[in-house]
Image: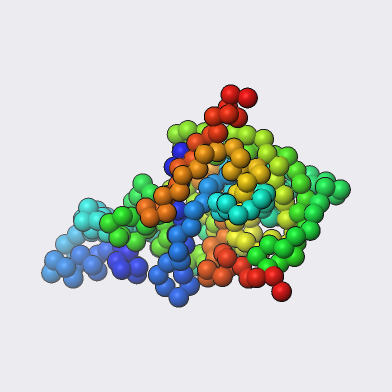
Amino acid sequence: MRFAFRTLPAASGGALTPWPVVDIALEGLAAAPIECLLDTGAPRTRMSAEIAPLAGIELPGDLTEEFYIGGVKTVGALARVNLTVTDGTDEFSWDAPVWFCDPWPHPFGLAGLEGFLHHFIVTIHAYDEYLDIEPEPQLQDA
Amino acid sequence: MVINGRRWPPKQVLALVTGLDRADFTTHQARRALTRLGFPAGRAASPRGRHPVVSRAATPLPSAASGADGRPALLTEALRPFIGLWVAVRGDDVLVAAPSPKEVVAWLAQHRQRAQSMFRVVDSEQAITGAAPQ
């Protein structure tokens, strides 16, 4: 599956630097996949806690952790969620731990090692501004 | 029409370029002629509002990123009126924009629409990269 880098307009005119994203649909929120930054430096997959209730996800009060993200101290609550990516032709779903964080400083989610990168072989074509992902064969056979 | 990152009325552009009188052709004919020349077209959308608004681009491109030929990406320009808002997009179309993801999702459900992606349109790279912990 191929995902083009996304380019947003700059308020001052022109455009911001294109960045690598994948659109990840949460079970219960298939109509609005969440834009997630591909973050090879992130140990976990995280997104705003604001998203959880929209997908009908109840966040447990006991599985939480505090950490800094984007310079902001936040609290993440863990939930296992069925996730789906599609490029409009192919589709792949998997079950993954996702940390829903409040507050959340970013306009997107973060697709990190646990929850996303462990499940895919990712090839980043930064010069041409797109990335390819394919499901990890070992997990497909498992 | 979007030319060098700015929107122009298609009839005005075609009249200036060809010297024809604007009454000699319709907006649709002007838009079609210009899009065939490679200029992206986008329907003017309402600026930020309290309620979700819809903007549909007239000529979707296959890629959401900047084209290799250097043309401005249609989605990027379609998003410009919605800086600071949450949006749902499909291809190069902005389906809806609203102050919160809850409102975006509600609009999608109400109109039985399915987006490709939902995110907030930031206005600076700092909003993406964040700041170092204090």
- Determine the residue positioned at 48% across, 57% down: A19
Where is residue A104 shown, x and y percent of the image?
69, 61
Q: Nearer the viewer, residue A33 or A75?
A: A75
Residue A56, quarter of the rendered image: top right
Residue B25, quarter of the rendered image: bottom left
Q: Nearer the viewer, residue A83 or B99?
A: A83
Where is residue B98 shown, x and y percent of the image?
59, 60
- Determine the residue positioned at 75% across, 43% down: A79
Q: Quadrant of the C terminus of chain A?
A: top right
Above or below residue B28? Residue A137 is above
The answer to whether any part of residue B9 appears in the image is no
Q: Nearer the viewer, residue B133 or B26?
A: B133
The answer to whether any part of residue A16 appears in the image is yes
Above or below residue B111? Residue A18 is below
Colouring used for the render:
rainbow
- Determine the residue positioned at 63% across, 34% down: A94
Tally of numbered discs? 0
- Determine the residue positioned at 61% across, 67% down: B130
Above or below residue A25? Residue B86 is below
User: Quick check: B62 left or right of B117?
Assistant: left
Where is residue B120 shown, x and y percent of the image?
57, 60
Q: Which residue appears farthest toward the left when viewing the image? A: B19
Where is residue B99 shown, x and y percent of the image?
62, 62
Q: Nearer the viewer, residue B129 or B9?
A: B129
Q: Which residue appears farthest toward the right when viewing the image? A: A62
User: Quick check: B14 left or right of B44?
Assistant: left
